[in-house]
Image (cartoon, helix red, strand yellow):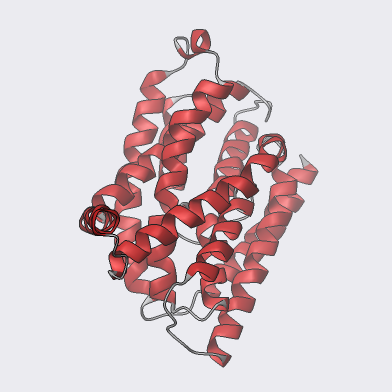
Amino acid sequence: MDLIQAVLMGITQGLSEFLPISSSAHLVFTSGFYKISNGLEIVQDSNQEVFFDIMLHFGTLIAVLIFFRKDIWNIIKSLYLGIKNNDYANQDCKLGIYIILGTIITVLVAYPLCGISEKLVFMPSGVGILLILTGLLLLFSEFYAKKHQNDAPIGLKKACLIGMAQGFASIPGFSRSGLTIATGLLTGMSRTTAARYSFLLSIPVIVGASMIYPFMKINPAEIVDYNWMAIILGTIVSAVVGYFCIKYFLKFVSKFSLSIFGWYCVIAGIFTTIFFNMH
């Protein structure tokens, strides 16, 4: 892994984490295209690349923490007051409870899928097929939402369903934001409400993955030999690009359909599946 690859993957993560196009799929594709164009094997430095992917997600975590800092503070404050006064009627308090519940469901679904997720990192063609499925789900959710236009609030049942969707999205090719926003639309939420909740729901999972996973899977002795210049650069690029992506994506979904991303996922999935099967 070199600095050029780090910058390319930082940009890719910053854009694709919050757009419903699967950041994990695009990281796999970007890495695969880069290696093939430079005559390298797709399976290479696996532990370092897994750790680098985690740090790229940490970069987008920084972006979402900064962008939603006021919302996060209000949720934490409301949760504290709710527990203290045994009064959970406040909307921000309820939102905090839904995020906690959704996160628990996410972990229960995602943990058994860890082995599959790690293998797919080095199977771009398989990831392409799952990206096609993501696109089809986005297209169907937009079609359904137009027939059942609503702006229903988040509830316990919806929090559980969206948490399940986020759990399945741990598999590369399934877009986290795509599956969670689509699930929100299918349960009657507006695009803006679903997108905002999707971004807030990502915070605990990314925190857990970036802090717990390295201790479970990465040998500390190996970390010393990693290309830290590339890792830090990629993380910074991911954070900066991710911040502006959140800002403009929320403006986009308030006015326009997500169908364009659905078609993109289908076309990109077909292309990459064919390309990597040929290589």
Q: Residue at x 51, y 81 (%)?
A: 188
Left or right position of 193 against 26: left
- Give percent across and percent down for residue 25: 60, 48
Let me know if residue 141 appears in the view: yes
* The quarter of the displayed image where residue 178 is located: bottom right
Extreme residue toward the top, this view? 221
Left or right position of 46 against 202: right
Residue 109 vertical position relative to residue 138 in the rendered view, above or below: above
Let me know if residue 181 appears in the view: no
Residue 76 vertical position relative to residue 228 in the rendered view, above or below: below
Left or right position of 36 against 88: right
Q: Residue at x 53, y 73 (%)?
A: 260
| Number of numbered discs overlaid on the protein picture | 0
For the residue pair 80 and 13, the one nearer the viewer reads as 80
Residue 211 vertical position relative to residue 11 in the rendered view, above or below: above
- Give percent across and percent down for residue 53: 50, 35
- Give percent across and percent down for residue 69: 23, 52
For the residue pair 31 and 166, the one nearer the viewer reads as 166
